[in-house]
Amino acid sequence: MKTKERLAIPPVHMKEQDPRERIKNQKEVPLGYTSEQARREASRCLQCRKAPCVSGCPVGIDIPGFIEKIEKGDFQAAILKLKEKNVLPAICGRVCPQEEQCQLPCTVGKSRKSVEESVAIGKLERFAADWERQNGNVILPDIPPKTGKRAAVIGSGPAGLTVAGDLIKLGHGVTIFEALHKPGGVLTYGIPEFRLPKEIVNSEVEYLKKLGVEIKYNYIIGKIKSLVELLSEYDSVFIGTGAGLPSFLRIEGENLLGVYSANEYLTRANLMRAFDQDISDTPILRGNRVAIVGGGNVAMDAARTALRLGAEKSIIAYRRSEKEMPARNEEIEHAKEEGVEFHLLVNPIRILGNDDGWVTGMEMIRMQLGEPDSSGRRRPVPIKDSEFQFNVDVVIVAIGNSPNPLIPRETPGLKVNNWGGIIVDETTGATSIPGVYAGGDIVLGAATVILAMGEGRRAAQAMHEYMSKN
Ligand SMILES: Cc1cc2nc3c(=O)[nH]c(=O)nc-3n(C[C@H](O)[C@H](O)[C@H](O)COP(=O)(O)OP(=O)(O)OC[C@H]3O[C@@H](n4cnc5c(N)ncnc54)[C@H](O)[C@@H]3O)c2cc1C
């Protein structure tokens, strides 16, 4: 096909569950491509020689390579190509912000003057991974003979899983130590089922186990065993413990009953399955009128979860305008379609409660945007005498997370910066302790799945070199 013909093919949209139906269930919202749809979407790719999309991918997937295989209908070859660089393609295809990464520089999107019309790289990645899982055709890569070296990985989020996958494929022994009873980190306890079914996370973890990765659950490093002890038993250690420490508003009323951090709320709903009363007795306040403070993916997830748990109203309260919202556009659109109310340029100043200590409302103030702050976004400034009240019975605080402090606090000599992130060498992920590497949210602060994986990939390479020499 000629370039002109390819450019004339309209984007193939993925079908989605009807918003009125989907707020009554936990099933995934986008329904996936059929083989024909995937091949048609793949035929929009121009196979650019310079492949600007690859430079936008933090793990360097050969994007034109896997898309070409899909276009030809060789889905097995497509997934093998993807897995050369990405051990979690079904996950990345669903939750990566492709519109800011691989799809942003896509030549097709540029020539159609809209990133929305770029080749749907993420959706094609998801298609190939789902095809493999649904066909049960998982082909394991050849693994070199055992090197005799053993690495310990702390945390089974995307950073830790990537390190484990890369090191096992290089012939090293790998044991993951995970604090929770399930693997996946935020993929399991944070991101809801309707965005990322847990069956998918589990099957990607199963793949790693088939390669020989061992996982020890309910194992908190820093309590059960120290990092120093771990280092005496293993040849190298990776810290991928994430940013699970929620930030709070620090306003009056925040200790009332009915105030959650988004982390706690989503952990109860997702990891502890509070949405499924048939199998779980995890308590959660369902609320009639739920307010979520924040404007990121975490806030959108909490707002949409509240609707699915039966709230009549789910309100996003964000102190800037929609343009500054850090959430992905797709998540904002999905939340709006489902009936989440957006209240922009507002900020809570006090949470109100009754004599029994339960939340009854929030006192808010209207904001306007001033000069840009250190993040480059315009600073929200309160408007004098603009206070008003929201009548709500549950408040969820989703204003950010910081690195988990346990290991840095318990490990002498492990250097951290002023916000608690572990300091690493940017090219290797090496920490201040020889043989110990770190990556993902514990280094970057709350970031993204693919950035955590990119950091994992870089650290795994450095750990391999370190273990080969020592
Ligand atoms: C609700 C929510 C929605 C999100 N949505 C998106 C999205 O759509 N797209 C996107 O790209 N990113 C999203 N993110 C961000 C993304 O999930 C994170 O950037 C990513 O998971 C970070 O990976 P990680 O491996 O560094 O840490 P985590 O995923 O946090 O995993 C860390 C793991 O370490 C374990 N651990 C912690 N301390 C210890 C210890 N002492 N011993 C043993 N184990 C320990 C934890 O239990 C956890 O399993 C979202 C985040 C949240 C909270």
Image (spheres, rainbow, N blue to C red):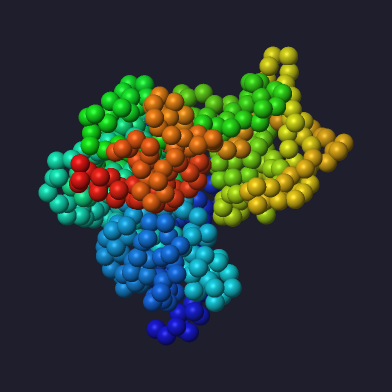
Can I make out residue 192 in this image? Answer: no
Q: Residue at x 41, y 42 (%)?
A: 424
Q: Is residue 408 above or below residue 79?
A: above
240 on left or right of 403: left
Can I make out residue 427 in this image? Answer: yes
Image spot of residue 81 (x, y percent): 29, 63
10 on left or right of 130: right
Front-lying residue, 149 or 301: 149
Q: In this view, does 160 lie above or below 83?
A: above
Image spot of residue 164 (x, y percent): 28, 43
Q: Which residue is drawn at 20% across and 53% down?
A: 140
* Residue sticking out furthest to the top: 356
Q: Is residue 273 above or below residue 104?
A: above
Looking at the image, in which quadrant does ligand 1 appear?
top left
Q: Which residue is drawn at 59% across and 28% down?
A: 260
Q: In which quarter of the image is the N terminus?
A: bottom left
